[in-house]
Image: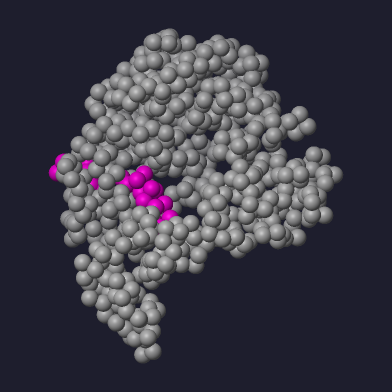
Amino acid sequence: MNVTYVTDGSFEGLLSAIHTMYYSNDKVIDILLNHPKQLDFSVNYKQIQTNTENAHTVYQAINQKISHQAAYIITLVWLSELPQCGSMIANFIKLGFNVGRRIDNMLTHKDVLPVHKASQKVTTEKHRMLGLCRFSMTERNFYLCEISPDYNILTLIAPHFASRMADQRWVIVDTQRNLNAIYNCEKWYIYPSKVLNKIPYSKDEIQCRALWKKYFDIIAIKGRTNPKLQKNMMPVRYWKNLTEFI
Amino acid sequence: MDIVEKLSILGAAAKYDASCSSSGSNRNTGKFGTASLPGICHSWGADGRCISLLKVLYTNKCIYKCAYCHNSADNDIPRAEFTPKELCDLTQSFYRRNYIEGLFLSSAVVRSPDYTMERMNETMKLLRDIGFGGYIHVKAIPGASKLLLDEAGYLADRMSINIELPSHESLKLLAPDKSKNSILDPMNHISNRIIEYAGAQKGSGAFAPAGQSTQIIIGATPDTDKQILSLTQGLYNKYQLKRVYYSAYMPVTNHKALVHITRPPLLREHRLYQADWLLRFYGFKAEEILDDSMPMLDVNLDPKACWAVRHSEFFPVEVNRASLEVLLRVPGIGNISARRIIRARRIGRLSFDDLKKLGAVLKRAAYFITCNGKYTPHLMMSAEGMYRSLITLDKRPSFNNAIQMSVFEEKVPKTFQMLPTVGRLQ
C-alpha cells in the first residue's frame, strides 16, 4: 500500500520511520518531518511513533552493514534541513541495505547523487564558517559570536573553536535557529536560546574593531579592485555578521 | 605614533606579498590557537584576495635601494616600526576574535639583516611563550646569520624568501644590493633543515612544518613565461618549495630600468598560476607547457587546453579505461572529477551523462574523450577549429582590469595552425 510517513521532526523519528519501513510492507512515497498543514485526500498518512531503541538499531546497522562514511554523510544531510531530506535519507539507506558498502562508489546513482550533493553543501558551509565567525568581547568577560548560516552547522563548528579558543569562554549564537553553543573552558554544550538582551561590549572591543576595519581597508590593492570576486568568495548574505562591514 | 597609525603604514606596506596560505601545519597546544591542516580563510578584501593571516611588516625602514620596491631607502614615505610586544598583543587580540588564522611577518631591512631577524624572532617567541599555537609565516631576511634562520624555523610554521625577479640580469639591474646567492643560499639552508627534521622522530620539535615558499614579480622585467616556469619547476624540485607565488607588477616607483605599464598584468599572472597548478597537481613538466616555439602562455586559452590542442596524438582518451594520470590531462576534468570517475567506474561503465553528474565539464572535455567508444562531433574538429571554439568558452569577464581583448583581433597563433585533427578517428 502506498503511504506517506509523518515523523515528529527529530533524527530519531526519521530513523524510527526507516525501521518501520524495513519491517512492514508499506510502499513509502515520502517521509514528512512535520505534520502537513494541508492534508491531501489521495495520500495515506501514517504517523510514526519515535522509538529511541529502534533508531539506535538502525544507526548501528548503517555503520555495520553499509559503511561509516554513509553514516557520517547521513548526519550531514540531516543537518542540511532541506525539506526533502527525510525521503532522501530513507531512499539512500534502503539502497545501502541492498548493496552494502558499494554505495560509497555509486556516485551517479539517482538515490546517491543528491545525498552527496547535499552533504557537500553542508561541509562547504561548515568550512566557510570556521573562518567567518566573528567573536566580540563582552562586558561580562566572555566572547560572543552571532551567525546565521543556511544549514544547521553549529554542532560541526563548535569542536573546532573549543580546541582553538581553549582558554577563553565563548558563546556562538545561531540567530536563525535560536540555538547556542556554549563553552566554559572545559566542555561545549548546545542549548536552545531565547532572545538575549544585548550585552554591551567591553572597552577593548571597540578599539579592536576599529583596528580590524582599518586593516581590512588598507590590505586591498587598489589597482586590483574586484568586488565580484570578493562576493563570490564571501557571499553578501554573511556580511551582516562580519565586523569588517558593520 | 599610535598603534592605528603603525598598522596603517606597516599593513599597507605588506600588501604586495601574495602569499596568504595558512595550510600545511597541524599544531595544537591545548591552550590558545591551533593550526588547521587545510588552512582557513577568514575574509576577502575589496580586491578579492583572501585574508587569512595578519600580514604586516615589522618595519618599513630600509637600508636597501631596490628599484621595484615601495620601501626603497630612496623613497620619501612615512616610516614606522612595531615593537615585538605591540605586534604580539595585536595578533592575539585579532586571533581571539577569529579575524585571522595567524601572523604573516615580513620586514624591510633596518640597521642590518641580523638585527631585523632578531627582532622578528623575538616577536614570534613572545607569541609562542604565551601558548599561541596559531599559524606563523615568517620571511627569512636575506643575509641574516644561519643561527637566526634556524631559530626562526623552530618558531614558525612556514618560512619564505622572495626571489622577486626571475633572472640574474634583472636582479643585477633592479636590486643591486641583493645577489642571486644571497637569496638561494638561505633557501637551500632552510630546505636542508626541513628535510632533516621531517625525518626526525615526533616530539623532537618541528622545523617550519608547513614548508617553504617564495614569490616572483611578473611583468616588471622582460623575462618570458618559459623562463619563469622553468625557474618555478627548479625551485619545486631542488628546494622542495611548497608554493611559488606570482605577483602581477604594480608600478610603485618610477625607476628608469623598469618596464612602464599602466595596468598590472593580471591575466598573465592568472595563466601562470594555472600552469603552476599543472606542475604541482597534474603531472606536467615545464618543458611540456612551454618551449622555444612558444615562450609565452596564451592569454586566450588556459595552458592545459593549449597543451591538449597541440597534442592530438594523445587523444582521444577513453574515460572508462584511462588511468588517473591520463584523465588528469583532459581539459574539463580536474583532480576531483578524475578521482570520482575512477571510483564510480568500479560500479559500472560511465556514459556522457554520468560524467556530467561527476562534475566533469563536458563542453570542454567533449573535444578529447570517448565514452564507451562513443564520441561527439567535437572530436573531429581540426586543431584550429578546436582552438577557436575553446577560447569562446574561456572568456574571463572578471579580468576587466586586465588587457581587454576584442573578438575580431584574435588571431589563431601559428603553433595551432596546420596541426592534424585529433588522431585515429578521422
The residue that appears at 75% across and 42% down in the rendered structure is: B310
Quadrant where the C terminus of chain B sits is: bottom right
Quadrant showing the N terminus of chain B:
top left
Residue A144 % position (x, y): 23, 47
Residue B289 can be seen, yes or no: yes
Residue furthest bottom in the image: A41
- The region drawn magenta spans A119-145
Please tell me which residue lies in front, B224 or B61: B224
Residue in the picture at 47% in, 17% down? B192
Vertical side of A14 occupied by A209: above or below: above
A130 part of magenta stretch: yes
- Nearest the viewer among A69 and A140 is A69
Query: In this view, which residue lies farthest toward the right?
Result: B418
Number of marks drawn: 0
**A23 falls in the magenta region:** no
Look at the image and name its color scheme: one colour
Q: Is residue B369 left or right of residue B84?
A: right
Q: Position of residue B223 (x, y in %)?
A: 68, 25
B186 left or right, relative to A245 = right
Examine the rendered structure and indicate whether residue B124 appears above or below residue B395: above
Where residue A201 sits: x, y (%)? Answer: 21, 44
**Foreground of the two, A62 or B87:** A62
